[in-house]
Image (cartoon, helix red, strand yellow):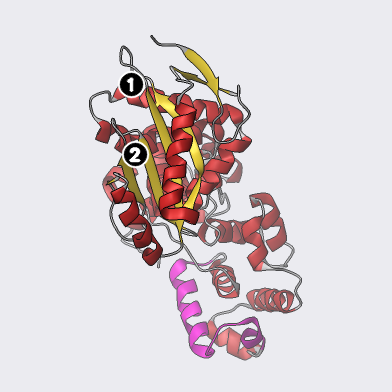
Amino acid sequence: MQQSAKISILGLEPGRVQLASHDPRWAALFQQEKERLSDAIGEFVLDIQHVGSTSIPDIPAKPILDIGVAVHNFEQARVCIQPMLQLGYEYKGEFGIPRRHYFVSGEPRTHHVHMNEIGGKDWETQILFRDYLRAHPVAAGRYAMLKQELAAQFPDDRDAYLDGKAPFIQSTLADAYGWVATLPLDEDRLHYATQVLAGRDPDLARVVERFGLPPLWSRPAGFTTLIHIILEQQVSLASANAAFTRLQAAVSSLTPQAFLKLDDDALRSIGFSRQKTRYGRLLAQALLAGEIDLQSLHHLSDDEARKTLMRVKGIGHWTANIYLMETLLRPDIWPVGDLALANAAREVKGLTERPHANQLESLGEPWRPWRSVAARILWHHYLSIRGMTLD
């Protein structure tokens, strides 16, 4: 008979999460299985990540045990895998750290083990996700219920349940709580966010259908990238790229020290205006004096990182936003001062005139928390219809 009980999930206080059809005996079973794994592979076993039940109508609920295993390299993974196979676990993932390993055991397959490389993207995402749920009981409860809803959608197909779980839950959490949108963009999140935006906006969907997924357009952190962005201020990309190529040819290594050794004539021949020469020198001097720490930007909020950059004369909103978008890979930056973005928005949205900054700001509101991805889609349109590429 289906009944309801309150249990602890992800270390939250008991009573915070409601799961249907929970059997009180499952907790002991979960602990026994964790101890069995710990005896076999020892220190690699992490805490139970979450426990719950797949509640399918008219079918007795099943216990679900998820355990994390963290390894530093492929050799450690091999040490773990053989004992797990001997314990009766079936390997379901692709071999090759840093890609995720996935194992199932039990009858039915209710024990799940996720093995990831420490420091790898999958491991980092899992840890962030766990910590996020611990800090947000409402989201944790919603997550628990989503697992049940998904199991109900695919009662006869466990593979469909597993394959569909990530985007299904990720989509709900991203929209409801913004968790995914707090992480830097990567190729996977770019693909996910593009799907979200295409589902919301038919105009963006047409761009994606015609030209495909936009590039990530990531740039390395540091002085070199900021100088390149300064060169891009108020000129064409082709002109800026040509000047940047000449700059790289003029110095063996583009560092603040090397830049400051170039005199006015040298910089003018490279393509620096008098104003950009000053901006470049002020930036180099600020970095050498320790007035700005570019590494610290990774740990700051969007507003804090933007304000830190803008303390250097010559770095305004546009330059700071491009650095946040393409170097820090922040997902919700909207560079309203970008001329190509405004022109692309006019074309894609069928406007009679190019939108000014305030209009562009309003236009981007429905695309939160993925405005950086919306900008990439618009830039992708702008470049593609003109036969241009952005290196």
| Marker disc for residue 352 | none
Q: Secondary structure at mark 2?
A: helix
Magenta residues span 235-260
Against 157, residue 370 (above or below) is below
The kind of residue on which mark 1 rests is: Ala
Q: Which residue is mark 2?
A: 205
Q: Is residue 131 magenta?
A: no
Tell me which corner region of the image, top left, top right, bottom left or bottom right, holds residue 321. bottom right
Residue in the foreground of this view, choosing between 12 and 308: 12
Q: Position of residue 382 (x, y in %)?
A: 39, 53
Q: Residues within 10 Å of mark 2 (few under 14, many from 20)?
A: some
> Which residue type does callout 2 highlight?
Ala
In the foreground, 156 or 305: 156
Is residue 180 visible in the rendered image? The answer is: no
- Looking at the image, which residue is at 31% across and 39% down? 105
69 sits left or right of 95 in the view: right
State the residue in front, 266 or 191.
191
User: Residue 357 appears at what percent x and percent y?
Assistant: 59, 46
> Residue drawn 51% across and 60% down?
326
Horizontal relation, residue 240 to residue 136: left or right: left
Task: Confirm whether the magenta stretch covers residue 241.
Answer: yes
Left or right side of 246 for 108? left
Residue at the farthest left position: 156
Q: Nearer the viewer, mark 1 or mark 2?
A: 1
- Position of the C terminus by quadrant: bottom left
The quarter of the picture where residue 267 lies is bottom right
**Is residue 92 among what the camera can see?**
yes
Q: Position of residue 192 (x, y in %)?
A: 39, 43
Q: Which mark is residue 152?
A: 1
Whether residue 325 is situated above or below residue 364 in the rendered picture: below
Report x, y in % for residue 231: 56, 72
